[in-house]
Amino acid sequence: MSALEVRDLNLLRHVFLGLALIGVAGSLINAGYGTCVEIIAAVAGFSLLGFILQELRRARRKSLELEGQLVQLKRMNSFDEMSAGIAHEINNPLNIIMQEAEIIRVNIEFSESCLLTDEIDESIGVIRAQVRRCSEVTRKLLDMGRKRLPVTQQVDINKLLKGMLALVDEEVGGKKIKVVRDIPSGALSVNTDPPLLRQVFLNLLKNAIQAVGHRGEIVISSRREGGKVVVRVADNGVGIAEDKLPHIFTPFFTTKSPEEGTGIGLAVSLRIINQLGGTIDVESSVGKGTVFSVAIPVNGARSS
């Protein structure tokens, strides 16, 4: 039963209680029991007041959550515009550096006065590798700034996940990582953008692989929950500290080493899921692992 259905039942229960008490109160008034009526009215009032306060607190929490999401979206929009311009400016010198490094290598290789030693060749290789890494970062920045509208279609989430896990099997080959598939045999059809969703799941799976290192367990599951399909990617890796959890979707914030991550993947994933009308939740404990829950609405807006 969904949370919305539970709240509806609570509301109906209080309404019926109030009506019943009013009916009893009317009968007692007719019978001349005034004091009993006052007690019943007080009980009914406190009961309804408690329910109203509970609903007000729930509405306040929801309002704060929506306000936080709105602030995050505004920041992401501003960052998207800025990042696209920065990426374009950086790409040109990166291309020149890569070309010049190759020219240096070729000139030394064919030069009679200068030998291409192993040290020089290795240094040139390092330059090329770092340029490629910077190019990957700028590519992600450009992806963030493109604001491509989702092209939705009916897709079987379970089939999509199985295809993604085939890629993961290749990546964990040689490592002592156990990948558990908790995926129903039937279809879980949703109206969404498959390429964008693959990008999100691939990023979450890569994060899980890095979190468990060379030994650990990753569990991926899918379930229909109300009007949404929820996919969970869980690992028993290093986990995320409580003070860092609120920042993990912030661009360039990362708990990984510089060689492992840039802090862009989760920011892009959050933006994609928001575009698809869904949500991403995370639970984590240091030393115990992390669980990412991606909820996608079954009936997304169809592309025109």
Image (spheres, rainbow, N blue to C red):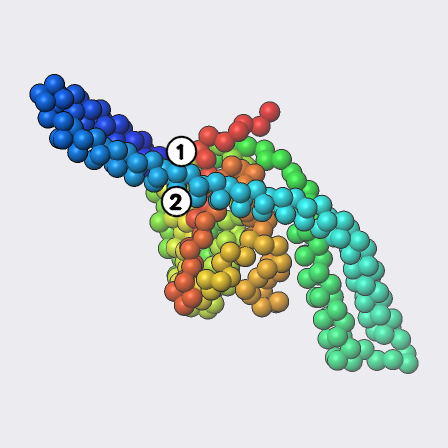
Secondary structure under tag 2 reads: strand
Q: Say if 258 sits above or below 59 in the image.
A: below
Tell me the quarter of the picture where residue 259 sits. bottom right
Identified by mark 2, the residue type is Ser
Taking 58 as reference, is 70 left or right?
right
Residue sitting nearer the eye, 281 or 259: 281
Question: Horizontal and vertical percent for residue 72?
Answer: 58, 47
Residue at 37%, 46% in the rendered image: 183
Tell me the quarter of the picture where residue 44 sits. top left
Q: Pick the quarter of the image with the N terminus.
A: top left
Disc 2 marks which residue?
222
Question: Horizontal and vertical percent for residue 119?
Answer: 75, 80
Mark 2 packing: few (<14 Cα in 10 Å), some, or many (20+)? many
Residue sitting nearer the eye, 182 or 291: 291
User: Seen from this angle, which residue lies furthest right?
Assistant: 113
Question: Horizontal and vertical percent for residue 10?
Answer: 28, 34
Residue at 44%, 41% in the rendered image: 60
Q: Which mark is residue 227?
A: 1
Residue at 57%, 62% in the rendered image: 254
Spatial distance from mark 1 to mark 2, Cα to Cα? 14 Å
Q: Which mark is residue 256?
A: none
Residue sitting nearer the eye, 191 or 37: 37
Q: Say if 234 sits above or below 107 in the image.
A: above
Residue sitting nearer the eye, 108 or 58: 58
